[in-house]
Amino acid sequence: MSEQSGRGLGHQTSARVIAQPDREEGILRAGDAPIEHERPEDWGWHHSMGKGGRILLVFPIVYLLAMMFGNHEGNVENIFLICFAAGIVVILLWDMRRRKNAWRSR
């Protein structure tokens, strides 16, 4: 350990180790309070866009299918475009079914 802090050498410091519920133990310095539980939703994480996000998901599907009509001659591109659009549709249908059967849907 470093000489500046004196930790590990038997010197007393103003910090103490505390056990926090549902977290790893942390170092609490003098004058600080332990960290209370913060929900990720309070910071904007783990939040869905709601119905607007599901409605906006139609635009990439239409865009992918519209790209089939272009200046390319092969059909390999069309296969990939259709597969990606179908994948988005499957995800959208799965999400609709999940929300329908969920405890609380938005």
Image (cartoon, rainbow, N blue to C red):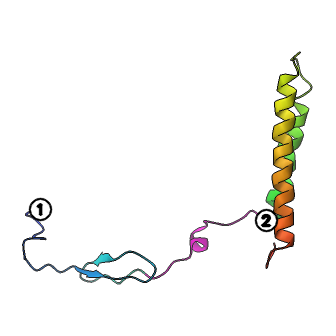
Q: Nearer the viewer, residue 34 or 90?
A: 90
In the rendered image, which residue does mark 1 sit on? 2
> Residue 43, percent across and down?
57, 69
Residue 86 visible to an observer of this rendering: yes
Amino acid type, callout 2: Gly
Residue contact between numbered discs 1 and 2, judged by CB atoms under 8 Å = no
Query: Which structural element holds mark 2?
Result: loop
Q: Quadrant of the N terminus?
A: bottom left
Q: Identify whether 10 is placed above or below 44.
A: below
Above or below, comparing residue 74 to residue 19 in the picture:
above
Q: Which residues are magenta?
A: 36-49
Q: Which residue is mark 2?
A: 50
Amino acid type, residue under disc 1 in the picture: Ser
Asked if the magenta segment contains residue 80, the reply would be no
Question: Which of these two is toward me, 69 or 81?
Answer: 81
The stretch drawn in magenta includes residue 47: yes
Q: Secondary structure at mark 1?
A: loop
Residue at figure coordinates x 49%, y 81% from the top left? 37
Q: Which mark is residue 61?
A: none
User: Residue at image x 85%, y 41%?
Assistant: 85
Note whether 37 is above or below 76 in the view shown: below
